[in-house]
Image (spheres, helix red, strand yellow):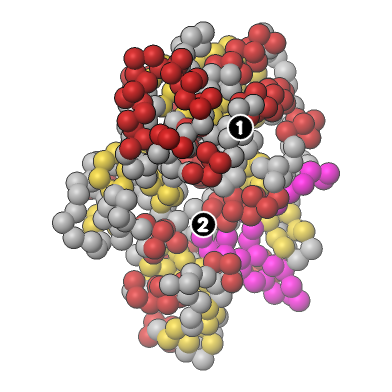
Amino acid sequence: MVTTLPGTFLTHMQEILGTDYNTFLESYNNEPVRGIRINQLKVKTKTLGVLPPSPHKGTRPLDPGCMGEQLRFSGATSPVCWCGDGFVYDSSERPSKSVGYHAGLFYIQEPSAMCPAEVLDAQPGHRVLDLCAAPGGKSVQIAGHLQGEGLLMSNDASPSRSRALVKNLERAGVTNAVVTTEQPKKLAERFPDFFDRILVDAPCSGEGMFRRDPDAIKAYTANKPEACAAVQQDILRHAAKMLKPGGRLVYSTCTFNTQENEGTITTFLQSHDDFTAVQIDHSALGIQPARDPLPQAARIWPHLANGEGHFVALLEKKESNIPDFVFLAKSIPPLEFTAFIDDFLCMDFPQNAYVLHGINLYLQPVALHLSGIRVARSGWHLGECTKGRFVPSQALAMGLRKEQARYAVELSEEDAFRYLRGESLFHSEAHAQPQKPWILICHDGHPLGWARLVQGRLKNNLPVGWAVSS
């Protein structure tokens, strides 16, 4: 592996690490570290104990604090020290093949990538921007911290990359997110001094991913760090305008290069005297201080921790007397949706901002003025209002709890996989509701999607893009 690493990269690493250089190189002989992070929107536990290696595969409780919820995945071996919801798992495991993955109970994420959202420390009620969000792992993590309260705006300038972002948010059951596909400059013009927290997981040269991603090595050039640093400065400049006074911004990269890390932040601070670097608690997180002149920031090194390379800096904007943002008025839902609520849901649905784009109905946590902004999802996609009736969406199913549906069917693991493959099913419980066609399909109490009850059969309503091949 070492022989394939770029020479300019190796030279720079030797300058940075000095006597630690050889130990760093030896880490490239090890397998990349793999991680999963529990989704706090679906698994209600604040801290998870260490999961010892299992002698056999199968269902096993996560921890006594999980309130009885189970994951059909047995390979978690140790916790991620900087993320209480994160676990390293055995490389022989395939967690994406479990029903729990498709139910959104956990997210597969490289362990060091879990650190920036922990440092960001979003709280319920905050307005949060994830500016470079695709494919969505950090957005899902932030959503878990928000617990459905406040606003999450997840943005990625690439419309194609945003498709994965939307699906990951929907699978996780995130109900308070808006997904945009705009350039930072355009968002800064619309949302000045708006967000309590901003995450800038900046595009970078990707040196920290060399061990796990050979394509990152192929894409690397000697001038890539310099080019990335220029882009990073531009993104930070616009992000700074969107942060509320007193708010906090996390800047992170998955590279080792000092020009893109300490250099980018130092340059930013020199031109933004209303920002200061905040000390990260390295010992509590189990990570290392960054290099001079920015020891307040943090680094994750593959030879010192269970993770690939990462850099994280925390910045705070000074307080001022700028008035808070004025929101648009709330709106009421269309009659088709209120009829659906009465017939098929048993919950008080939020009276926030309902937005109808064509036949598609969305719910925003706050009423936002988004005209002129490229939007992939205007909020929680509830479904379609068509010909006087309402067709519920997959996103609605994934954002509900089983007890919020009047009619729900619990499937075995075998039948759950059949459902996920797009098959229609017969189920004895279905006969109890012959006049009620929309059934929430669940496994272990967690929704997987909708089915229509047609002549005693559960007709599969899983969208084509959600079906699994095996």
Residue kind at label 2, given as amino acid type:
Arg
User: Is residue 17 placed above or below 200 in the rendered structure?
Assistant: above
User: Is residue 176 placed above or below 120 in the rendered structure?
Assistant: below
**Callout 2: SS:** helix
User: Is residue 125 placed above or below 99 in the rendered structure?
Assistant: above
Kindly identify which residue carries mark 1. 221
Kindly identify which residue carries mark 2. 171
Tell me where residue 332 appears, x and y as whole percent.
72, 55
**Which segment did they paint magenta?**
371-398
Q: Could you tell me how far apart the alpha carbons at marks 1 and 2 are, in whole angstroms?
A: 36 Å
Which residue is depicted at the point 70% across and 50% down? 159
Tell me where residue 183 appears, x and y as whole percent.
75, 37
Q: Nearer the viewer, residue 304 or 245?
A: 304
Residue kind at label 1, given as amino acid type:
Thr
The reply to whether the magenta stretch includes residue 111 is no
Q: Is residue 316 something that shows in the picture?
A: no
**Callout 1: SS:** loop
Q: Residues within 10 Å of mark 1 (few under 14, many from 20)?
A: few
Tell me where residue 20 appears, x and y as whole percent.
34, 18
Q: Residues within 10 Å of mark 2 (few under 14, many from 20)?
A: many
Q: Is residue 57 left or right of residue 416?
A: left
Which residue is depicted at the point 82% across and 45% down? 371
User: Is residue 81 placed above or below 229 in the rendered structure?
Assistant: below
Farthest bottom residue in view:
455
Mark nearest the camera among 1 and 2 is 1
Q: Is residue 88 something that shows in the picture?
A: yes
* Residue 296: image tag: none
